[in-house]
Image: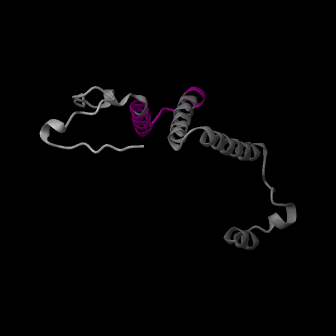
């Protein structure tokens, strides 16, 4: 509603030449790119979780940085390099097994066995099906 009011007040050429007046090839390329980006994100979220979407954005940031350096000769800023390092570390930690992340003490009983607590005077409740 507010955009329509702003268009009526400020942009008379929209009514004279149409809503796509002034669009060139690059403007349509940006619109197409955003549409394809939305479709890609919806496909990612259909088959994966939100964490994968965040990492997909991070990979896009890294690819953009590399392409900017190669194609345009831009030098990456320290903030961008730090962001790439943080994203890389978080992706590494997210995909590591939990036992490699912290030094947790190993359980006293083998996995799947219930410790016997009857020695201490405790009674076990037995459920019947």
Q: Provide residue 23's location: percent of width, then percent of height.
A: 78, 51
Left or right: where 99 falls relative to 54: left
- Direction from residue 74 to residue 22 in the image, left or right: right
Pick the front one: 40 or 20: 40
103 vs 58, nearest the viewer: 103
- The image quarter in which residue 32 lies: top right
Counting the numbered discs, the total is 0
Q: Quadrant of residue 110?
A: top left
Q: Is residue 52 above or below residue 5?
A: above
Residue 120 horizontal/vertical position (percent): 13, 39
Position of residue 15 measured from the top left corner of the image (x, y, whole percent): 84, 67
The colouring scheme, among rainbow, by chain, secondary structure or one colour, is one colour
Q: Residue furthest left?
A: 120
Quadrant (top left, top right, bottom left, bottom right) of the C terminus: top left
The magenta segment is 70-93
Q: Is residue 51 magenta?
A: no
What residue is rendered at 38% in x and 32% in y? 93
Q: Quadrant of the N terminus?
A: bottom right
Q: Which residue is farthest front?
A: 128
Picture residue at 85% right of the left edge, 61% below the top? 18
Camera-side residue: 77 or 104? Answer: 104
Q: Residue at x 53, y 44 (%)?
A: 50
**Residue at the (59%, 31%) spot, across then down:** 72
Does the magenta-highlighted stretch encompass residue 82? Answer: yes
Q: Nearer the viewer, residue 103 or 35?
A: 103
Q: Main secondary structure of the magenta part?
A: helix
Q: Is residue 80 left or right of residue 42?
A: left
Q: Is residue 100 above or below residue 10?
A: above
Residue 16 picture location, percent across and down: 86, 65
């Amino acid at each position: 509603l507010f955009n329509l009011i702003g268009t009526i007040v400020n942009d008379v050429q929209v009514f004279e030449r149409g809503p796509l007046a002034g669009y060139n090839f690059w403007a349509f390329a940006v619109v197409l790119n955003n549409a394809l980006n939305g479709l890609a994100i919806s496909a990612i979220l259909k088959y994966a979780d939100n964490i994968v979407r965040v990492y997909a954005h991070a990979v896009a940031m890294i690819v953009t940085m590399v392409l900017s350096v190669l194609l345009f000769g831009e030098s990456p800023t320290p903030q961008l390099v730090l962001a790439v390092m943080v994203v890389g570390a978080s992706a590494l930690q997210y995909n590591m097994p939990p036992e490699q992340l912290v030094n947790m003490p190993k359980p006293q009983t083998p996995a799947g066995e219930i410790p016997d607590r009857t020695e201490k005077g405790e009674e076990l409740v037995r459920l019947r099906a």
